[in-house]
Image: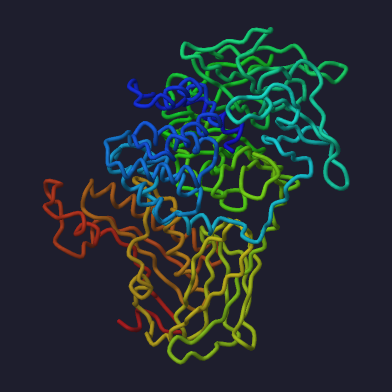
Amino acid sequence: MRTVSRYISVVFAGVFALSAYAQNGKIKSVENDYEDFAYVKTSEVLLEVANKGYRSVELFQKLANSYYFLNDMENAVKWYGELMSMNEVIDPEYYFRYALALKGVENYEESDKWMKKFNELKPDDRRGRAFLSKVDYKSNIEELSYLDVEPENLDINTEYSDFGTTEYENGIVFASARGGGRKYRWNEEPYLDLYSAEKTENGFGEATELQGKVNTKYHESSAVFSPNGRYMFFTRNNFFRLKYKEDETGVNRLQLYRATLSEDGSWDEIHKVHFNSEDYSVAHPTLNLTGSRLYFASDMPGTFGQSDIFVVDVNDDGTLGQPENLGPSINTEGQESFPFIDTSGNLFFSSTGFPGLGGFDVYKSEELDQKVASGSNRNFPIENIGMPVNSSADDFGYYENLVTKRVYFSSNREGGKGSDDIYTFVIPECEQLVSGTVIDKNTDALIVNATVILFDGEGNLIRRSNADANGAFKFDLDCEKEYIVRGEMETYASDEVRFTTPKKKQDLQVQLLLDKDVQEIGPCDDLAKVLDIPIIYFDFDKSNIRYDAEIELQKVLAVLNKYPTMTIDIRSHTDCRGLADYNERLSERRAQSTRQYLIDNGIDAGRLTAKGYGESQLVNDCGCEPTNESSCSDEEHQLNRRSEFIITSIKGESCDDKE
């Protein structure tokens, strides 16, 4: 069945409007149940009607939606398929739900077809645009997955819904419908309460209800605790001081509450947050490391879709400021919910709006909390965190302890004990190894004792070694970092490979193919031409070495190390645009900056001279005098913005001798 936790999220959106002209008495008879989210009863009656051969758009819409919200994706696919076969004009949202239901039965190829149709009908919808930007999303997700990890279904799970875990003291706090009592009409399970369970050597002890005034006869879920342990924020139905309230449509919304820890260990002094409303829901709180910002889900005014992620400042007394939507990088026209901020400021959240494996998938946006604090931008890149957390079912309630690497998440996937279960695993140690061989590119012979150098992504030297008797080498690396591996050998041109390590274990195999250096270099040669260095770039009006310039200068550095008798003259040139005196001074600063970079990286200063020539040595007719204007294109001007590395002497021969 579709889970209580799904209700906790989709209550934001409600359901599609019902037809005003029901064509069948039995369809009409369950209209109130349908509007009240009583999908178990609704589906039973509507299925009886459909099995008698009655066909209508309204029937198939309600029947498919009922199964969809009950998480019976096999039947949802069947009846959405019948709806599509009617060839009637329908809300494009049904195309999206059909695509999501098809993912639920792992029919990804068919799902992709309907997502394309959805995008054709709603080309401005972020969900369709996100799909088209990553049509190969499945392969991308697999690359980010821990495919060899099997998550553990916790022993404390029951036949009911258990979800939404957070660590607290020596245990966990979570929501569960195990308590018995009155049942919720959505899925005929008891209402949710908050429970805690102590850690033991073999798992967890018996789960017990949180002490105090937190739990009521309605839903409670999604607890988070302040860093000092004094406050707890949690989700509850709009039920406060024994008053149950609904909006104008008869829906009881979700709200955020704050409880205070009493001396006896119970949670009392329950307070509503000031932006709760009878007209929209707020739910699923999470706090950053310092407790200064709280993130939550809501469909309040300003929401992009069915529910969005918001952030709000937390005052010293535990009260909250004014909420702010995280914007379109995070939020779509679909559902974004169940946020979690880890101690490094990374945001994890569940969404139906981005390409995923089905239902809710969990996504990550790195260092989002720091970006929110700086207020510098609202561009938050996201990525699907992959398996085993994500599946074709609903996956949500992510929690990660960065110290122990212990992960908890909730899911209604196949094989669970109840409608929702809590799963856990420890993130594997990220072991990265790059190994390979150095080979003669022309003969395929192994090059013994070749120098192999490891750089970071910015060209900084990390390690240097020599290939062994088999031409082999290896380096241990860190995860999620960029590296360059370069092979060098006398009389050969060097070869290098650039790569970024993933977040999971990997043994990367590379080959460094060295080409016999048949090009003789001697006095007066320009290393920029020999090494194919087009331009040493500088930022506008600057003379400091840029990152991309460092990569090119590493090539010059390698040659200077290879030929210790070589001396060079560094020459910097500009195009004609700008004042001639200014161009000469700027090029001089750039030439000296380039020289200093090579000195700082171990080259003796006596081997290097440098001079800036400004616009005095143009290589074409792109001059600007006397009006300081030119008809040349940017590409023609660029030929003059060049750096030269003229060999002034090598192996006892000088450029003067050659001349």
Vertical placement of residue 165 versus 102, above or below: above
Name the image quarter holding the N terminus. Answer: top right
Give x and y (percent) for residue 52: 42, 38
Give x and y (percent) for residue 385: 56, 49
Residue at coordinates 39% horizontally, 36% vertically from top-left? Answer: 60
Residue at coordinates 49% horizontally, 31% vertically from top-left? Answer: 45
Give x and y (percent) for residue 163: 67, 36
Give x and y (percent) for residue 424: 71, 47
Vertical placement of residue 259 versus 329, above or below: above
> Taking 427 as reference, is 134 left or right?
left
Residue furthest front in the image:
52
Vertical placement of residue 23 versus 562, above or below: above
| Residue 564 in sight in this render | no
Name the image quarter holding the C terminus. Answer: bottom left
Residue at coordinates 39% horizontally, 68% vertically from top-left? Answer: 569
- Nearer to us in this view, 578 or 106: 106
